[in-house]
Structure formats: structure tokens, C-alpha cells
Image (spheres, helix red, strand yellow):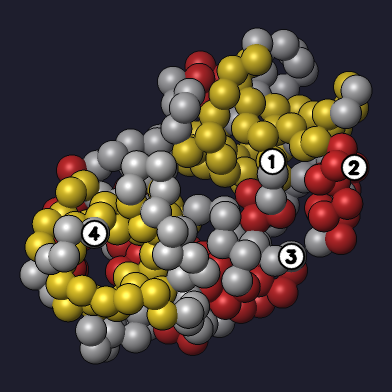
Amino acid sequence: MIPPASRDSASLPACAASLLVLASMGWANAADCALERQGEGRVTTVVDARNLRLEDGREIRLAGIEHGGTDRPSGRAALSAIAAGRDVTLHGDDDSPDRYGRQGAFVFVTGSEHSVQSELLRRGEAVAAVDISEKNCAAALAAAEAAARDAKLGIWAETTAIKNAESSGDILSAIGHFTVVEGKVLSVRQAGAITYLNFGRNWTRDFAATISRRIIPAFESANLGPKSLENRRIRVRGVVSSRGGPRIELLRVGQIEVLGGK
């Protein structure tokens, strides 16, 4: 059995404030992605840091995690150490393949209580994604990432792991990649159907997170209304784009984490 992770209250909120409580309980105490069983098999090939191939030819993409801006060689090595040659079970909401023929799933090595994803996160070889709606699963991933972040393992040992919201050029270097950015929201402005969380004074050059009007009620229900974030330090995660300055579009509550202090 994998030893429990250390506690950390700064974890990813996927289902509002209740997730913060679950994550603060520690990785070992959160139910780990106990989703419907979608099959089983033996891992014959580790394609890369997020993809496995089974003996029957199926390619499995690890759900719920991202590379965090870079596809580290150590990520593939870690996945090989955990899963290569092992019998696994697959869990998820849907076993339909994506357009590349890969089945997205949470993968459990036979006999383990924790998913392969959680183990990669605990080692700092992945970043928790934001598209997991099942709260216990999201909390387990958040707590595993938080433990690695606290211990500065893997990705989190690098000073660039979390981008500074004031360093627009650094964030722009991550265009097209899933990235974590941290800073203080200096102002909140609305332009048409888009609300901007501005982290700098120059709206055309500095970093901003954007929220579509149709999604704002979900953030307000989670006590994350845009105006409440003004002058707060927050951490956001998502794919970086460029519209003048660097941008991350916020589509889910789990992309925002409010940090202590102002």
C-alpha cells in the first residue's frame, strides 16, 4: 500500500468549498476515483507519460491529469515503473474512444487502492486536470498533487512550475499548453459577454483569466463570483492562449483556487 501523503489545504477545488475540506484530509483518506469499471487488461507498452497500450491492442489515455506545460521524460519513466507489464483495471464514465482511438480511463494496478494517476501526481510527474466532475475523484487527485507540491517533487521542484501572473512573457512561452498561473487579481472588468480577471494594468499585454457570462452562475454558486476575487491572490490552471496578452479561459470552477493572503 502506498503511504499516505502529507496534508495540504491548498488543493484544487472541483466542486466548490466542499472539495477543499476533502483534499485537506490527505490523499490516503479520499476515495480515489471509484468510478464504474470499464474493463481490464495487461499493460504491454508505455507510449508516453499519459498513454498506455494493453495486450489486446487498446490504447488508454490517463484521464484527470495533464503534463503541466512540458512532457517530461521522467513522466514516462515513472509511468513505466508503476504500470509496465502489470495487470490493470479501467474505470470511468464512458469507454468510448476519442478521435485518436484512445480510451480515456482511470487506471488501477491490480491490488492497489490508488489510481496510477494519483501515484503520478504524488510523485510530481503530472498536474491535476479540471474536467473531473465526480467530487471524491477530484479531491483525491487534488490532494495527491498538493502533497507533491508541498514536498517540491518532480515538476514542483522547478521554479517555473507555477507561472507568475506578472511575467507575461513567461506565460506566453506556454501557449497551447496546460499551465498553472498564480498572482493577485488587480481588477475585474466585463466586455460584452466576457468577464476579465486582470492580473496587470495593461489589459492588452498583461495576463488575464476570462469567464463567459453563461458560466458565471456556476462560479457564483461556488462562492467564486468574479467580483469577490478582486484583490485576492488566486491560482488558475488551463490552456494558455494569446489575445494580445496571455489568457486562460475559465470553463469550470475547478480552474480557480483562492490562496491565503492578499
Q: Residue at x 63, y 26 (%)?
A: 247
Cα–Cα span, label 1 and label 4: 32 Å
The residue beneath circle 2 is 227
- CB-based contact (under 8 Å), mark 1 and mark 2: no
Mark 3 vs mark 4: which is more N-terminal? 3
Residue pointed to by mark 4: 58
- Looking at marks 1 and 3 on the same chain, the residue that comes earlier in the sequence is marked by 3
Provide residue 82's location: percent of width, then percent of height: 18, 68
**Front-lying residue, 151 or 212:** 212
Q: Amino acid at mark 2?
A: Lys
Return the residue at label 1: 250
Real-space Cα distance between discs 1 and 2?
15 Å
Cα–Cα gap, marks 3 and 4: 35 Å
Q: Disc number at residue 93? A: none
Say if 181 sits above or below 34 in the image: above
For residue 163, above or below residue 97: above
Tell me the tag on residue 16: 3
Residue 110 visible within the image: yes
Looking at the image, is mark 2 or mark 4 earlier in the sequence? 4
Q: Earlier in the sequence, mark 3 or mark 2?
A: 3
Local packing at callout 2 (Cα closer than 10 Å; few below 14, some 14-19, many 20+) is some
Quarter residue 6 falls in: bottom left
Q: Secondary structure at mark 3?
A: loop
